[in-house]
Amino acid sequence: MKINNKDYTFLIQYQHEGGLRESFNSLTQKTYRFDFEKWYQSGYWDGNCILYSLAEGDKVVSNITVNVIRFTVLGVEKKFVQIGTVMTDPDYRKQGLSRALMEKVMLDWEGQCDMIYLFANDEVLDFYPKFGFVPVNEYQAVYQLKELQKGLTFRSMDMDDTNDRDLLFHTAQKAVPLFKVSMRDNAGLVMFYAHYFDRFSIRDFLYYIAGLKAVVVAEYEGETLILHDILAEENVDIKTVIHTLALENTREVLLGFIPENSGDYEIRPYKEEDLTLFVPADCRRLFEDHQLIFPLLSHT
């Protein structure tokens, strides 16, 4: 691929080539201070995570990662593509490499998915509108816990335990949609966050409710319970999950998803620091009209 009169090698889905994967990981470490090697070695990196890269010789100098994720959105099955790990080596920036890769991704996936979206850092907010993306708000459901009801028993999960890792993986594989936006059939990405992502990990926030066959991702901050995600093999009552995990001092519950039935919840605009959701302009109304959010475990 020639860009600004300079030749680069275009690479796609090359993670099984050791030398190139090492170069990709080196660029990821330099840019974002993490890499994908432990995840790759675990065997959980599947065909849903696709690398689009440019190389000079055997050095990967620019990359965009395409993550194919199936969702249930407002009860309808969707195939979305999330763009992530957008990066260029500092010595190769301002030469149009990211633009060339974005154009390639957009061309490849036009008509092949229901929507392409991404989360952008504040320093690159001006880049993505050039490709037809617009920023949209996400929303958070909040539940005020006025009285604590008796819940079920639950336990912490240990990601160093093979049985618990297998339990998480198989639960994620079989998880049914519980929210207005629910990720489907992407257990590999769940495992990335649970055990193989050093910069941020949910490994200390995993709980299992045997009575519901449900894995819950939750944090406690003072009187607040932050319920990031629920993975369950069967439909579960979210209020039951809340009362199971709530402590005696819990007063407020922040949800990282919008329940199907949100009548008992306050819906607030949600903005993560230094992160903005971008969607195609013709998908903006979907988020504005229905006040949606992508669950934590679907972020890439």
Image (tube, rainbow, N blue to C red):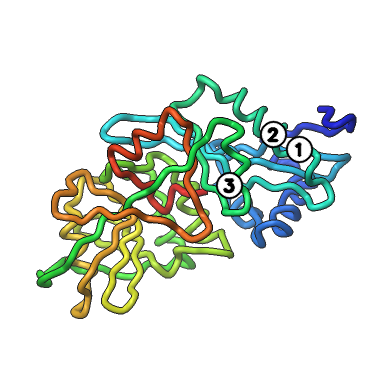
3D distance between C-alphas at marks 2 and 1: 6 Å
Question: Could you tell me how many numbered marks the image carries?
Answer: 3
When the figure is inspected, residue 281 is found, relative to residue 93, above or below; the finding is above
Of the two numbered discs 2 and 3 in the rendering, the one whose residue sits closer to the viewer? 3
Residue underneath mark 2: 101
Left or right: residue 292 versus residue 300 is left
Q: Secondary structure at mark 1?
A: helix
Confirm or deny contact between disc 2 and disc 1 (CB under 8 A): yes
Left or right: residue 52 versus residue 293 is right
Q: Residue at x 84, y 34 (%)?
A: 8
**Residue type, label 1:** Leu
**Residue type, label 2:** Leu
Residue underneath mark 3: 125
Of 122 and 236, the residue lying toward us: 122
Residue underneath mark 1: 97
Confirm or deny contact between disc 3 and disc 1 (CB under 8 A): no
Earlier residue among tags 2 and 3: 2
